[in-house]
Amino acid sequence: MNSNEICVSLDIGTSSVKVIIGEMVNDSLNIIGVGNVKSEGLKKGSIVDIDETVHSIKKAVEQAERMVGIPINQVVVSIPANQVQLQDCHGVVAVSSENRQNREISIDDVTRVIEAAQFVSIPPEREIIDVIPKQFIVDGYDEINDPRGMLGVRLEVEGTIITTSRTILHNLLRCVERAGLDIVAICLQPLAAGSITLSEDEKNLGVGLIDIGGGSTSIALFEDGHLKTTSVLPIGGDHITKDLSIGLRTSTEDAEKIKIKHGHAFYDLASEDEVFSVPIIGSDQHQQFTQLEISDIIEARLEEIFDLVQNEVRKLGANDLPGGYVLTGGVVNMPGVLELAQAVLQNNIRIAKPDYIGVREPQFSTGVGLIQFAYEHAKIQGREISSTVPVEHTEKRVPKQQQQVKNKQIEPEQKIGKKVKKFFGYFFE
């Protein structure tokens, strides 16, 4: 068949908005387009200005569209771990089949049992965003990952319900909707990032995934193969930039550039020979600094972040993590982060990033993981999160005017996102 499945992820972060276009070929992911723009309208991982956030989303989408020459209409969206709660759930259904003697479990049965698991009491200010199956049980036989095609009478699921603040979800959906996009799936950021950064052995042993972004640091603890708990610290790379801005008496924009180009997180390994010029704010003068001098500032803030992470992990009850810590997020791209983390956390540490051309940086872990996790999760439940796009369309650039005409020709009722709109109907009224 001359067609490929195209999946698009939207990762809205405090420092940047990332749109990644993935092509699924025989369950294998290829990255074919990336949009990455500076984020406006967010602070500490939360939306504070809807109009600016919508503008940032549109810019990132347009950037990704230009790379592949196809219009983007549907996206998988990440939801931050802010105010997220996890609770166990259990669902039971009778397998429905026309042939009573040969009851084969279908996608419909899986969908029904997951829906049955959602009948739990939750506070009115919270909303269920997903149910992650831990195991399926068929007629008493447990530890089944995918029951489709098996024979049985009784189907059960044990899983985790993920709920979030209705306000956070409402604002996120509103921004994506106003950017002219349909949401085909919503995924929790740590689960998305964990799907490509963590190995199965690490998840089974017990591992801490630390995602250090611009405005916040997310902590996710995995054990026995599943996400156990999450927490968010309202501190990240933007705080390092602000420290540099104050210490060097320069603008935030210049401090960010210096951090990216000359920053080093471990004072003992920083270079005294690397000298650069810094414009002084409020004047046309410049001042000379070395990497060693700014490393002193960066190390102090990052050491504080790792200390807070260690304290938070203890509060969450994880006294021992045999799998150690895995670091990801834009900040960990800085030299010296690994060495500093090893010195503070006193455990096995490694830095994880996607292994795909064009996105081999830690800041893209969530965006790439969104596609991978949502695709696998939807496959078991028989849901569609991808569009089928002819191959020749991906090889030929489409002028922007034609893209706009195509967008207008797509009838709303044909869009997959109508399922999500129906579920979250009150958000779009």
Image (spheres, rainbow, N blue to C red):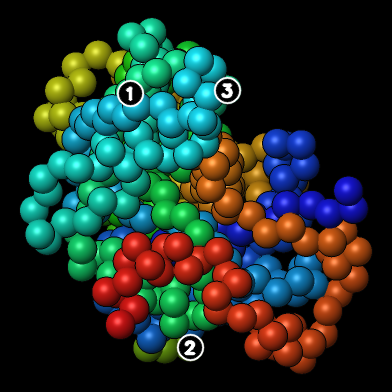
77 relative position to 65: left or right: left
Q: Does 58 sit above or below residue 344?
A: below
Q: CA distance from mark 3 to mark 2?
A: 72 Å
Quadrant holding the C terminus: bottom left
Q: Amino acid at mark 1?
A: Glu
Residue at x-position 35% and y-position 20%: 154
Q: Does 216 sit above or below residue 48?
A: above
Residue at x-position 48% and y-position 39%: 108
**Label whose residue precedes the other's in the sequence (2 or 1):** 1
**Label whose residue precedes the other's in the sequence (1 or 3):** 3
Quarter of the rendering containing residue 223: top left
Say which mark, if any, is on residue 284. Answer: 2
Q: Amino acid at mark 3?
A: Gly
Q: Which residue is mark 1?
A: 156
Residue 330 in the image: x percent, y percent? 48, 51
**Label whose residue precedes the other's in the sequence (3 or 2):** 3
Q: Which residue is mark 3?
A: 149
Give SS at disc 1.
strand
